[in-house]
């Protein structure tokens, strides 16, 4: 009898330990019917955003980047780009011939924005960026000499990967910070002017910032100039967002200003002209009381400790910036009876996204690499094989939901644009798409199996956000 009680108690303990795993599976497994519901909802929100500012949860921001006629693309010379994608900053230089082909590989220099600038003043942040630009230009002294000789400044494109409302190609105001930034003094300021001042404050007077774009816009343009089938630019990295070509006549809220009207006339572009629209899809379903997105308790934890609670809800379910934290919160719940793992999972940001990617690569029968990496990275000895399997399963669940939701958002754009059954290319940049094992496969499978989209080509636009900004500066 005692033996039976002992066995029963053991089984009950096993069931109790499995309940959090079963609950997590239920939370992260999204049905096909629910995904189609989100897709239809997003199409409606896109329409609202095109009609009027503030009407829905998607800003649908005009970029002022018009689709060029391919026979009119005639740019040559040296162009710069400054790409601020988060705490990663890049300065790039490209040299193009008369047809837009790069004469040589773009040269670039990467910088990490120190944490102190995330909550500094706008002047301090942009002075730091200007200092980085100055360091880069020292490696290219001939550019300064050529600018002096020709009496023409070198055109610069600025990729600013934060929600920004534009009033012109070189006029934009920050809507709200994301990705951990809380920099002050941005209210009502033109980010292009802030950058120009920061560059000139560091003694660089031969560069002129002529174009502002989002990272998705740069990603689209970088590929479109060489492949006219490109319809969407998408970022799946630290952040998550997309843009696409939209007919200007469909942007109902959009009143052409004199500069753009003149540009349309000079370019002989008719009413069917197309412009890149920056969706800012990360904000989908982020109005008060909206329950369209099935947020889990783990999502709510991530949202509560973020710098923008209640906003960018979809981005927090997709982007690499939050994937590690989501995994951490799930593991904290799942291993609440394992004091070693549970205590470690109390530490904020202890589970970086790169560790998620590494864990996903382990195909060994006993997951010995997970054992090793957990010891090396987190100093946790996960001896039990079942525990290692659970850790990998949690990483798979979080990855799959991210890819599934990204595919759903892309499907909404394609279906609204009537491009589901055409040969269309989606240019994608970002570390999650490029480096996370299994992500591309899950993205493609969802688009095919849930939405019946088969003719779409997903292509990596490596460093497209910066290169595209340089091209936009060139064709502006």
Image (cartoon, rainbow, N blue to C red):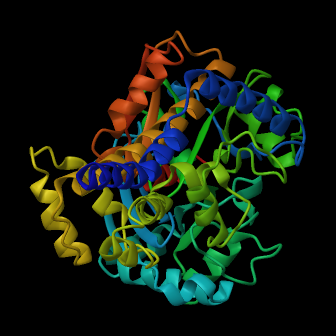
Which residue: 54% across, 37% down? 405
Instruction: Specify the quadrant of the image occupied by residue 281.
Output: top right
Q: Is residue 184 above or below residue 376?
A: below
Which residue: 44% across, 17% down? 448
The percent position of residue 404, horizontal first and vertical second, equals 49, 34
Which residue: 46% across, 41% down? 25
380, 41: nearer the viewer: 380
The percent position of residue 94, horizontal first and vertical second, equals 37, 56
Residue lying farthest to the top in this orientation: 421
Left or right placement of residue 306 versus residue 439 in this view: right
Q: Is residue 118 above or below residue 277?
A: below
Left or right placement of residue 69 versus residue 465 in this view: right
The percent position of residue 74, horizontal first and vertical second, equals 49, 38
Q: Is residue 451 above or below residue 370?
A: above
Q: How many marks?
A: 0
251, 184: nearer the viewer: 184
Left or right placement of residue 74 versus residue 310 in this view: left
Q: Taking the image as drawn, is residue 155 in sight? A: yes
168, 155: nearer the viewer: 168
242, 22: nearer the viewer: 22
Q: Taking the image as drawn, is residue 222 in sight? A: no
The percent position of residue 341, horizontal first and vertical second, equals 33, 71
Which residue: 42% across, 67% down? 336
């Amino acid at each position: 009898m005692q033996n039976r009680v002992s066995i029963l108690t053991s089984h009950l303990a096993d069931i109790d330990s499995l309940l959090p795993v079963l609950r997590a599976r239920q939370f992260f497994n999204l049905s096909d019917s629910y995904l189609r519901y989100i897709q239809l909802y997003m199409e409606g929100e896109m329409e609202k955003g095109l009609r009027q500012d503030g009407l829905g949860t998607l800003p649908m921001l005009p970029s002022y980047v018009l689709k060029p006629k391919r026979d009119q693309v005639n740019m040559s010379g040296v162009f710069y780009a400054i790409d601020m994608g988060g705490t990663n900053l890049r300065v790039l230089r490209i040299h193009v011939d008369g047809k837009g082909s790069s004469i040589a590989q773009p040269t670039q220099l990467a910088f990490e924005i120190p944490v102190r600038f995330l909550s500094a003043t706008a002047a301090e942040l942009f002075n730091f960026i200007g200092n980085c630009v100055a360091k880069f230009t020292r490696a290219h002294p001939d550019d300064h000499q050529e600018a002096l000789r020709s009496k023409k400044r070198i055109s610069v494109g600025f990729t600013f990967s934060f929600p920004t409302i534009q009033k012109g190609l070189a006029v934009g105001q920050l809507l709200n910070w994301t990705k951990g930034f809380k920099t002050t003094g941005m209210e009502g300021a033109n980010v292009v002017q802030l950058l120009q001042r920061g560059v000139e404050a560091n003694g660089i007077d031969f560069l002129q910032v002529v174009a502002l774009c989002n990272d998705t816009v740069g990603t689209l343009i970088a590929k479109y100039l060489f492949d006219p089938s490109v319809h969407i630019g998408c970022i799946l990295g630290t952040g998550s967002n997309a843009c696409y070509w939209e007919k200007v006549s469909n942007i109902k809220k959009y009143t052409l200003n004199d500069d753009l009207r003149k540009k349309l006339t000079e370019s002989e572009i008719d009413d069917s002209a197309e412009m890149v629209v920056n969706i800012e899809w990360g904000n989908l379903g982020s109005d008060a009381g909206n329950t369209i997105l099935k947020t889990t308790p783990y999502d709510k934890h991530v949202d509560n400790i973020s710098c923008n609670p209640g906003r960018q809800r979809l981005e927090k379910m997709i982007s690499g910036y939050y994937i590690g934290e989501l995994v951490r919160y799930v593991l904290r719940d799942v291993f609440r009876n394992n004091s070693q793992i549970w205590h470690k999972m109390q530490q904020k940001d202890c589970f970086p996204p790169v560790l998620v990617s590494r864990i996903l690569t382990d195909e060994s029968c006993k997951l010995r690499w997970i054992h090793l990496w957990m010891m090396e990275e987190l100093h946790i000895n996960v001896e039990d094989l079942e525990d290692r399997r659970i850790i990998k399963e949690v990483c798979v669940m979080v990855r799959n939901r991210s890819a599934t939701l990204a595919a759903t958002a892309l499907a909404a754009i394609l279906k609204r644009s009537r491009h589901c059954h055409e040969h269309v290319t989606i240019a994608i940049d970002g570390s999650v798409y490029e480096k996370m094992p299994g992500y591309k496969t899950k993205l493609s499978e969802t688009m095919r199996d849930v939405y019946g989209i088969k003719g779409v080509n997903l292509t990596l636009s490596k460093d497209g956000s910066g290169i595209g900004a340089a091209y936009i500066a060139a064709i502006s």
